[in-house]
Amino acid sequence: MIDLRKLRDDPAVRAAIERKRVDAAVIDEILALDSERRDQQQIVEQMRSRQKAASKAVGDADASERAALLEAASGLKQELQTAEQSLAEVTARVNELALLIPNPADASVPDGGEDDGEVLRTVGDTPAPPPQDHAQFAAALGFIETHQAVQASGARFASLMREAVFIEFALVQWVLQILRAEGFVAVVPPVLVREETMTEAGFFPTDRNQVYALEADELFLVGTSEVSLAALHRGERLTPDELPARYAGYSSCFRREAGTYGKDTTGIFRVHQFDKVEMFSFVAPDESEAEHERILAVQEQIIGALGLPYRVVNIAAGDLGAAAAKKYDIEVWLPSEGRYRELTSCSNYRDFSARRLDTRIKGEGGQFVHTLNGTACAVGRTLLFCLEHCQHDGEFLVPEVLVPLTGFDRVAIR
């Protein structure tokens, strides 16, 4: 949630929000309502003062005056109740609209949309397509089963099989060890959360169409463990010594993939259920930019150690999610498609989610913390890229860093 005072007083904040292609009419509406709310708040405070004075006058009056003063005080009380109801209604409307206003884009974020991100650096060579693409090679290895999975669950579901399962858990174990060395606390959080948890994490109402709902239980399946990790300090006051607080969450994730009909329909690039290790940080405001770069560096360490060629992209303002002030994507070269595809992202939310979570720094004048998140390992996609980059003479060569954890260094086509 944004700071309405800053939106009201600082034209640069409004301009930064509009860079995200927000309808200016929505901003005008919330500013008008906020002005009405502040005017109504002043009216209520004045009436409360008058009612307090009237009550005191009743107490000080003699018997001959008391009846008239009581009648006047009763009238003031009814007027105050009406005014308070009006204030509650306009406040609710302001809060409802505020949830639709995104985090302002950082000044360092380029303008534009999906194809306008700024490539910051490119690392590694881009090889020619392998003999088989990831879907074909996975099928030949017996790594992925889709036919029966689709029969059981529908499109965009798959089962990992045989050695692929051991590779998945080797990836998870290896990445968690890296994150532990970087000061992240490992967490296996809930994957079912309440609606307010989705809202406080910054996903509702804007991303509601991407989320699976269990309506009978009023619960939602998370699309990332970021949601549950954000709730770890909900409503808390963290001391400066407790910051930064870093967490590494491992969970299954669930996404509807709404709006992707016809895209990436083969293999496991875009599926409804996948496993992921996610980084999440609570930091002091003056540390959030450095923390963003730190998370990005960890991502590059992981992808580099797997031997995958990649590039880092500063995502354009019009392509940022509602909660992100700035986001980096790491795109890995996918040889069969001859292009880079997203593998990880990391975002700085600043105080956007912390305002909803009411997570502050103790003893700092009620200052909100900043929150950041980043993919450490999207397991299915990481395996997919490895399937194309680790083919050799009909065998899958397990990345060297994973061999001690898998117990094998190669898998032959069956």
Image: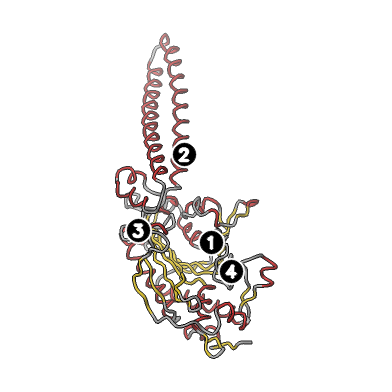
**Of tags 2 and 4, which is closer to the observer?**
4
Badge 1, how many Cα within 10 Å: few under 14, some, many 20+? many
Q: Which residue is mark 3?
A: 111
Question: Mark 3 or mark 4: which comes first in sequence?
Answer: 3
The image position of residue 412, as x and y in percent, is: 59, 88
Kind of residue at disc 1: Gly
Left or right: residue 204 versus residue 366 is right
Kind of residue at disc 2: Arg
Left or right: residue 195 versus residue 214 is left
Q: CA distance from mark 2 to mark 4?
A: 41 Å
**Which label number is shown at residue 223?**
1
Q: CA distance from mark 1 to mark 4?
A: 19 Å
**Of tags 3 and 2, which is closer to the observer?**
3
Question: Mark 3 or mark 2: which comes first in sequence?
Answer: 2
**Of tags 1 and 4, which is closer to the observer?**
4
**Residue 247 sits above or below residue 94 on the image:** below
Using the rendered image of the protein, determine whether residue 360 is visible from the camera's viewpoint. Answer: no
Kind of residue at disc 4: Thr
Q: Secondary structure at mark 1?
A: loop
Badge 4, how many Cα within 10 Å: few under 14, some, many 20+? few
Q: Which residue is mark 4?
A: 265
> Does the CB distance between marks 3 and 4 fall below 8 Å?
no
Q: Secondary structure at mark 2?
A: helix
Q: CA distance from mark 1 to mark 3?
A: 27 Å
Question: Mark 2 or mark 4: which comes first in sequence?
Answer: 2
> Does the CB distance between marks 3 and 2 fall below 8 Å?
no
Q: CA distance from mark 3 to mark 4?
A: 31 Å
Kind of residue at disc 3: Asp
